[in-house]
Amino acid sequence: MTDDELDRAFLVLAETGEDDRILRGMRTRYSRLPRAVVVEAYKDATVEVVRRHKRGQTITNLAGLLTTIARRKLAVVWQAAQEEEEAQQLLRLQAQHPEAWEHDEDRQAKVERAARFVRSLLPRLDNENYRRTLATMLDAAQAGMQLENKELGDILGCSPNTAGMWKLRSFQRLRPLLEETGIVTLEDLLEMYPLPEDDEDDEYEETDDD
């Protein structure tokens, strides 16, 4: 397929309404995700198809390939949303029954350790808004609070819908960074081993004593 043929194939999708049909199908399948997230996944899929074409890969079924790529991207976002919802449910229980948590120093220590670890990964995220979103949510989690999209948006200076999308996308970006270290679930994060002491601080103290 030449560049012109690929451009024509994209045009045919738009002219025949196939684009809209694909988007409707994905919005139905991932109905709990904001429309903007679904649309962005589809746009990302079109960019990925063009990249594959430029690398010389054969494109035979454009509609099918777009659908497959977009669904894979949305599946990752969906999983992140599910995990975020589980974390929010945990915070709601903590807020509703503080007496059951106030003496759990071990649990709080795990939360603090997990938060420090996640903060260490924030510089690796490729978007400032996603870094700000996760940092804000970590602040709330460490304080035993949960932030609804409106509250998160007020802090970040954006609309609730935008805050919700940033939240989902930030978890999507964070997930592979966690998986690199073997962390897949929230419990994995809470049960990880304590981080080692800062070696640079130790070296500084030894030099200072000398």
Image (cartoon, rainbow, N blue to C red):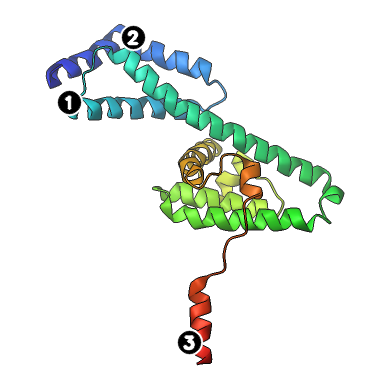
Q: Position of residue 115 (x, y in %)?
A: 60, 54
Q: Secondary structure at mark 2?
A: loop
What residue did someone put label 1 on? 56
Q: Is residue 57 above or below residue 16?
A: below
Q: The disc labelled 2 sits on which kind of residue?
A: Gly
- Residue 102, quarter of the rendered image: bottom right
From this viewpoint, which residue is outermost toward the top? 16
Tell me which residue sits at (61%, 36%) in the image: 83
Q: The disc labelled 3 sits on which kind of residue?
A: Thr
Contact between marks 1 and 2 (CB within 8 A): the answer is no
Query: Which badge, 3 or 2, comes first in the chain's sequence?
Result: 2
Q: Secondary structure at mark 3?
A: helix
Q: Secondary structure at mark 1?
A: loop
Q: CA distance from mark 1 to mark 3?
A: 57 Å
Tell me which residue sits at (43%, 28%) in the image: 73
Q: The disc labelled 1 sits on which kind of residue?
A: Gly
Q: Which mark is residue 17?
A: 2
What residue did someone put label 3 on? 207
Nearest the eye: 39 or 199: 199
Q: Dot 1, crowdedness within 10 Å: few (<14), some or many (≥20)?
A: few
